[in-house]
């Protein structure tokens, strides 16, 4: 897989910021579900995105090791859904490892993904085409 786009230049965007703590993963999943409602993302696509958001958000939260907020932005166009998550970090040169099992899961659920540092933030990006689940 590899590099993902951060999203379309236009289109509706939903954002939410939560404390960078694992106990707020349910809030992120709910935000994704609400944001893609009416986009053409069926229940399989929705499940895939929620699973991918859980995995990528967990990486960002554990890697950032900061109580700062994690921001989630979800946008879509007529063919794709884009998710961007950011969390502040103190070491701009840090790049987290993505475990093999997590890579397999992300490869199975989204079209592309990326984890990178961007100035003082750790950024995770997901892109998923609208349609049915990939692992059913």
Image: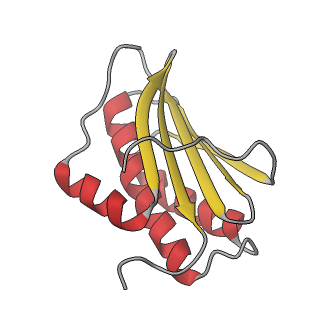
Q: State the image coordinates of residue 85 (x, y, percent, origin top left).
A: 54, 41
Is 110 displayed left or right of 70 in the figure? Answer: left
The quadrant in which residue 104 appears is bottom left
Outermost residue to the left: 100
Residue drawn at x 52%, y 81% as measured from the top left = 132
Estimate the x, y position of residue 2 in percent, counting from the top left. 38, 44
Q: Nearer the viewer, residue 76 or 52?
A: 76
Residue shown at the point (46%, 70%) measured from the top left: 48
**Left or right of residue 128, residue 105 in this image:** left
- Picture layout, residue 82 above or below residue 94: below
Name above or below for residue 44 compared with residue 26: below
Residue lying at the far bottom of the rendered structure:
136
For image coordinates 67% across by 65% down, the residue present is 79
Q: Position of residue 80 (x, y in %)?
A: 64, 61
Left or right side of 6 for 132:
left
Where, quadrant-wise, is the C terminus in this rendering?
bottom left
| Picture residue at 42% right of the left edge, 59% below the top | 52
Task: Residue 49 in the image: state x and y as whole percent.
Answer: 50, 65
């Amino acid at each position: 897989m590899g590099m993902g786009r951060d999203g379309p230049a236009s289109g509706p965007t939903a954002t939410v910021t939560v404390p960078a703590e694992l106990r707020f993963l349910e809030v992120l999943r709910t935000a994704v579900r609400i944001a893609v409602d009416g986009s053409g993302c069926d229940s399989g696509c929705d499940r895939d995105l929620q699973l991918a958001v859980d995995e990528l958000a967990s990486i960002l939260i554990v890697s950032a090791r900061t109580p700062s907020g994690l921001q989630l932005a979800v946008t879509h166009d007529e063919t794709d859904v884009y998710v961007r998550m950011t969390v502040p970090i103190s070491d701009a040169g840090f790049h987290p490892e993505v475990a093999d099992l997590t890579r397999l899961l992300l490869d199975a659920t989204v079209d592309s993904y990326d984890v990178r540092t961007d100035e003082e933030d750790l950024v995770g990006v997901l892109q998923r085409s609208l349609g049915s689940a990939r692992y059913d």
